Amino acid sequence: SIAFKQVPATDASIILTTEPLFAAAAGAYLLGETFGASDYVGASLIVGACVLAVLLDDEASDPDCDVQDPDCTPPTNMLYK
C-alpha cells in the first residue's frame, strides 16, 4: 500500500505481523470468541518476535553512519530521505 512506502521495512513488517493479534482481539470483542492456552502462546511468540525485531534494528543502527559506507548500517529512516 502507499502508506508502507513511507515507513521503514522493519516497522512495516511489525505492523503486518501483528495483524493476527488484532483479528483475534476483534473476534473476541465482536463475536465472543474465546482463547485457549495455545492462542496465548502464539500471541506471546508474535509479540516477542516484534520486540526482538525492534531491539535488533535499534542495535544495528548507528546515527553517525554514512549511507555510502559499506561497513556501516545506517538507520532505516535515513534510507528514505
Image (cartoon, helix red, strand yellow):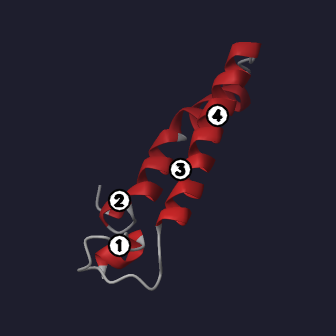
Identity of the residue drawn at 63% across and 31% down: 45
Question: Quadrant of residue 20 in the image?
Answer: top right
Residue extending furthest toward the front? 71
Question: Residue 72 bears which disc, if any?
Answer: 1
Q: Residue at x 58, y 40 (%)?
A: 49
Mark 3, Cα crowd under 10 Å, few <14 / some 14-19 / many 20+, is some
Q: Could you give the CA–CA distance between mark 2 and mark 4, rounded to whole angstroms?
A: 23 Å
Query: Which residue position is annotated with label 3?
Result: 53
- What label sits on residue 47 in the rendered view? none
- As rendered, which of 28 and 38 lies closer to the eye? 38
Q: Secondary structure at mark 4?
A: helix
The Cα–Cα distance between marks 4 and 3, rounded to whole angstroms, is 25 Å
Tag 4: amino acid: Ala
Residue named by callout 2: 4
Q: Residue at x 26, y 78 (%)?
A: 69
Quadrant position of the N terminus in the picture: bottom left
